[in-house]
Image (cartoon, coloured by chain):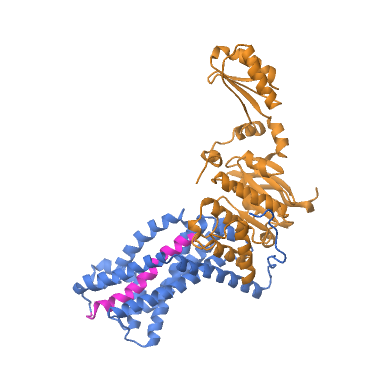
Amino acid sequence: MTTNDAAIVAEGLRKRYGSSYALDGFDLTVRRGVVHGLLGPNGAGKTTAVRILSTLLRFDGGSARVGGYDVVTEADEVRRRIGLTGQYAAVDETLSGRQNLVMFGRLYHLGARQAKRRADELLEQFGLTQAADRSGRTYSGGMRRRLDLAASLILAPEVLFLDEPTTGLDPRSRNDVWDAVRALVAGGTTVLLTTQYLEEADQLAGRISVIDAGRVVAEGTADELKARIGGDRIEVVVRDAAQLPAAAAVVARIGTAEPETDADTRRVSAPVADRMAALTDAVRELQAAGVVAEDIGLRRPTLDEAFLHLTGHRAETDADTDAVKETAA
Amino acid sequence: MSTMLQRPPGLIAPPPDRTPLARLRWTAADAWVMTKRNMAHVVRAPEEVIIYFTLPIMFVLVFGYVFGSGMELPGGGDYREFLLPGVFTMTMLYGLGATATGIAFDVDRGVVDRFRSMPMARSALVAGRSAADLIRAVLELATLVVCGLLVGWQWRGGIADALAAVGLILLLRIAITWVGIYLGLVVPNPDTVGVIVFPAAFPLTALSNVFVAPELMPGWLGAVSEWNPLSSTVAATRELFGNPGFGGDSWAAQHSMLLAVAWPLLLLAIFVPLSIRRYQKLSR
């Protein structure tokens, strides 16, 4: 790929805070017209990378081009071509939805009539027409996030940065955001999406870069990364700890790698190739071996396991990690 | 939601113009959008304005009527006439909270980040805030003048002197706006603003000539009060309005007109560069 085909090119970005590096040799190339996921735990440097690429933050080393323009020396040109939706709904909560979009349109130097027409179009597209004249304060979290996204799309930017766009959203609002992102890409926009959720990257992103400690540690399609992480695992919990070796023998025959045994939780697990065959085989063979199982299940690798595998250490756990799975209001 | 979101034909941000005049026009246009935004807040959230009005009007009523009957002025004269220029100035001080809270909200909610990622003039946010605050101050002052006239306050000098007094009050307001902008940029979150501003604003007004003539205070307290920037503006406007209670033996009291110009300029000289530096620091 030549640089010309790339919407975003970052080379060796370094950003230092005190004595520690938020980014430490960050390289990234994003092709035009795709969703590229930037997947990593809290503190990995995702937001720092997005803030540098969207001209908000100075950096200590390396270079970056967005839409073909240098983020430092041609920041004005970059700003005309990007949209940014951060972790918070960055809209004026006192103003109405329409007033917000008209204001941002005017600040993009659209004419008064053009800004109004664009605001109406976006309100319609994001299902906010009914609430258009209500104060942003009265919006639900999902509505505010949609308004925020609409504000990023006033010029239908060449490159859109989405920094954890669904954190704290309920599943329905999250799907709305995902739909909007897919629609945008169909319209030709390039999206850089940061997320802590493997599932979100999986749903949206054609390619994923895994970031850890300020640099990209793995890159590929979702399938490629999953193959590297290892696929599904079968997990058996036995009633009697004395039967663990027998269970392990069964799981070893079914799995594609040595089983792991955890005596405390009376659990045996191993990666498997064919989900359904593995499950039916396990049930049958455990029964044949006289092992009483309390639980037999298949599960996908968690993000923690993904990081353990790709980085050799565990991701910092964070209370927010499970927020997306919960039905938040 | 539609299945396709496309750039409507012809919707492209105009390229930034490099000539100084065009840049100035660009900046002015952005600042004007921001001014209108802040004025729209007044329309959409009038309760905020009402809160800021309630206090000065309450002070007029409580001090003018309840305590006022027991108040004496060193040179004689009507206490309510003495009080009103003080209340005008005090109201300017209380605007500090709204300015700082507005800026702090924009920083906290990422609105500033959005502005900074857009092809707009960087100075527009603060320039618009400052302009909107000035417009607001004119409206507030107009309302208070009407209230004052209703309780028997009047200006006895010429119209030019009265306008000069209004000019001094607004000059102080501009300086206070920039203190507020700086405060809004340094506080960790918007809620902190109230915790800082109100406990600071009350003693600042009490230790001034707003309610009581400094001559009637114990010596050192009177001196502090005379050098208070609020006092200079209040004393100068009393003189220009022809209201009682200005003057005194100290240097500060004798030169209140000079100080009423010097204090705001000093505050601006300190807080404009500080605010700009702090604003630029957001990109570190």
Number of callouts: 0
Residue A100 x, y percent position in the rendering: 56, 63
Q: Main secondary structure of the magenta part?
A: helix
Say whether residue A286 is left or right of residue B247: right
Q: Does the magenta stretch include residue A152?
A: no
Residue B39 pos. (x, y %)? 49, 69
The residue at the point 42 percent across, 71 percent down is: B173
Instruction: Looking at the picture, tell me which residue is in the foreground, A184 or B133.
Output: A184
Q: Percent x, y for residue B23?
A: 64, 71
One can see residue B87 in this view: yes
Residue reaching furthest to the front: A130
- For this orientation, the residue located farthest to the right is A2
Side of A113 where A327 appears, left or right: left
Q: What stretch is highlighted in magenta?
A: B75-103
Quadrant housing residue A301: top right
User: Based on the displayed image, in which of its 4 quarters is residue A21 positioned?
Assistant: top right
Q: Colour of chain B?
A: blue
Taking the spot 68% from the left edge, 58% from the top edge, the residue there is A157
**Between residues B120 and A160, which one lies in front from this camera angle?**
A160
Q: Is B94 covered by the magenta stretch?
A: yes
Colour seen for chain A = orange
Image spot of residue B185 (x, y percent): 49, 59
Q: Residue at coordinates 56% horizontally, 36% vertically from top-left?
A: A316
Is A262 drawn above or below residue B275 in the view shown?
above
